[in-house]
Amino acid sequence: ITHTTNKVVGIHSVGIPPAMRRKGYAAEIMKLLINTSLENNAELITLQASNMGKNIYLKLGFKEEFVIKNYRWIQ
């Protein structure tokens, strides 16, 4: 899932089925999203990542800026 606002592209969800992980698909999808964003004149690409995908994003040149924590309320 991506969302573009002006010259900023936000990548919000990249999912690979468990049976297809560790085969390079996530990296290829990310490269396609980066190249498409650049072709559309994006000036900034942001994403929210899980720990599972963190190493892929770091290898592609993204830098960690902060950590988002999720909470849920249990009644």
Image (cartoon, grey):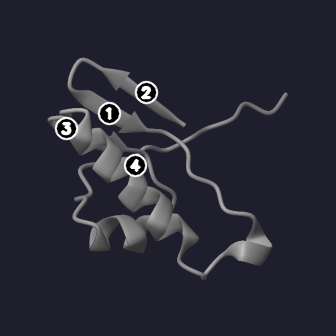
Binning the other alpha carbons within 10 Å of mark 3 as few (below 14), some (14 to 19) or many (20 upward) gives some
Binning the other alpha carbons within 10 Å of mark 1 as few (below 14), some (14 to 19) or many (20 upward) gives many
Amino acid type assigned to the residue bearing label 2 in the image? His
Q: Is residue 4 visible?
A: yes
Binning the other alpha carbons within 10 Å of mark 2 as few (below 14), some (14 to 19) or many (20 upward) gives few
Q: Which residue of the protein is positioned furthest toward the bottom in this rendering? A: 22
- What residue is at 27 percent from the left and 57 percent from the top? 64
Image spot of residue 22 (x, y percent): 60, 82
- Mark 4 or 2, nearer chain start: 2
In the image, is residue 12 above or below residue 49?
above
Q: CA distance from mark 1 to mark 3?
A: 6 Å
Residue bearing mark 1: 9
Q: Nearer the viewer, residue 30 or 35?
A: 35
Residue bearing mark 4: 33
Q: Are marks 2 and 1 in contact (CB under 8 Å)?
A: yes
Q: Are marks 1 and 4 in contact (CB under 8 Å)?
A: yes
Residue bearing mark 3: 44
Amino acid type assigned to the residue bearing label 3 in the image? Leu
Quarter assignment of residue 73: top right
Q: CA distance from mark 2 to mark 3?
A: 12 Å
Amino acid type assigned to the residue bearing label 1 in the image? Val
Eye-nearest disc, 1 or 4: 4
**Number of callouts:** 4
What quarter of the picture does the N terminus occupy?
top right
Residue bearing mark 2: 3
